[in-house]
Image (cartoon, grey):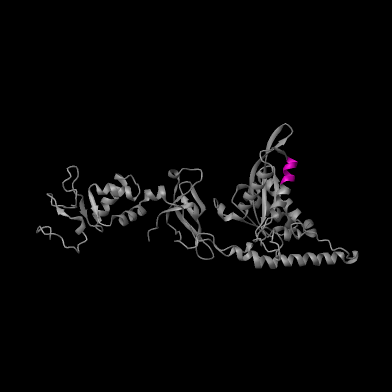
Amino acid sequence: MSLLKHRQLPRQSQLYRLEPYLGQDGLLRVGGRLQDAKERTGPILLPRDHPVTKIIAREAHAVGAGHSRREHTLSILWCEFWIARCRPLLDKIIKECVTCRRNNWKPTRQMEAMLPDDRTKPRERPFTYTGTDCFGPFTVRQGRKSTERYGCIFTCLATRAVHLEVLESLDTDALLNATVRFIARKGTTPKRIRSDNGSNMVGACKELRAAVRRWRNDERINRHFQKKDIEWVFNPPAASHMGGVWERQIQTVRKVLRAIVGTQVLDEYRLQTLFCEVEAIINNRLITPASSDVRDLEALTPAHILHGGPHADLSLGGCLLKDSYQRRWRHVQFLAERFWKRWVREYLPLLCKRQKYIEPTRNLQEGDLVLVTGENLPRNKWPLGRVTAVVPGADGLVRQVRVQTVSGEFRRPVTRVCLLEHATP
């Protein structure tokens, strides 16, 4: 009204500093110091919350700025329009833009889950709860030709001890034979084995279950042995972070191998010997902080529970032959109990603190439109999908989902999907 009556705006007005004026077309324009500029007319003033303003801002973001970020879009808008407090509006538009989500959005994150009981159970034999994975390849020399061998790691989820085996290939038979050798040498039949979802791992699980069923149905074997089934737990596909316990050990194995071998090409027997040496080195690593005080106990290592110490000597000196076995057995039990007491007191508290992703985020829900990320595909070729089912954890937070795409239905961790649109209620 003040401008219609050719009056100056009051100082309390939000538009006072913009010095608005009515143009010849009857539109409210921004004044200021550029009114006499021949190549520029004052931009049209628009209310921030009007629906037409949002349409103009979306058009400037999508067409004028080509889905660029906020400041570029703002420079395009300023050529013709002036929107008060425009940056929060543009932030909201960019956040809701499906194209920008597809090109720039980050995968979903969720608060770190509780540790499984496999990693927090004391007083179990080493390798009772085991994680396994394969790595490689390694070039070995056979006469005048070269071939490839692979490594298989078994790591105790509680004590963090490792056992290494050489694989001739990555097929099911090779992995199954390595598992049999591992059980025979360590003397522990695992209750539960965790692994990723590799095809050789899946095949080995089927072979083990079939073998256990045959053992149970064979009365001759049952008269001599009692076979216990092994629970094989698979992580979701493409969820390497869920197997961080053994993935980290593979990184350590590679580091030690590079330091010892370098670029040398070994034969198969030297490779097997080298794996044994690397296994001993890794089992002597510290799992609790080392103290600089000589009066403190030495830091715990996996070798303490496997062998009684990094350089353990369990001989009992002058004990008599008739009671040496009993005394030795009691000594070993004493060392094991001392290890587990220190493990509970010194190592277990180190696992309490979450390293990242402390705050929970919104759970994915059925019907959400998502992008399924792919490591070997460019971002613009990631397939669209619809969440068909969610798998909540014990704390009620969703970390696995089933996604329907044009290629079929897949199970994926939430870190492998990008949320585009929420499901309509």
What x and y, as percent, mark residue 326? 84, 66
Q: What residue do we see at 65% from left, 66% from top?
A: 346
Q: Is residue 251 left or right of residue 96?
A: right
**Position above or below: 74 against 126:** above
Q: What residue do we see at 28% from left, 57% from top?
A: 85
Q: Is residue 38 left or right of residue 295?
A: left
**Position above or below: 379 against 12:** above
Whether residue 273 is visible: yes
Q: Quadrant of the C terminus?
A: bottom left
Q: Which residue is at the front of the view, 77 or 66?
A: 77
Residue 272 belongs to the span the image colors magenta: yes
Q: Quadrant of the N terminus?
A: bottom left
What x and y, as percent, mark residue 357? 50, 60
What x and y, as percent, mark residue 254? 64, 46
Whether residue 227 is visible: no
Q: Is residue 302 left or right of residue 392?
A: right
What x and y, as percent, mark residue 285? 68, 55
Q: Is residue 45 left or right of residue 295?
A: left
Q: Which residue is at the front of the view, 306 or 214?
A: 306
Name the residue at the left extreme: 5
Q: What residue do we see at 65% from left, 44% from top?
A: 258
**Position above or below: 220 against 268:** below
- Magenta span dominant secondary structure: helix
Residue 285 belongs to the span the image colors magenta: no
Q: Which region is colored magenta?
A: 268-274
Q: Which residue is at the front of the view, 75 or 56?
A: 75
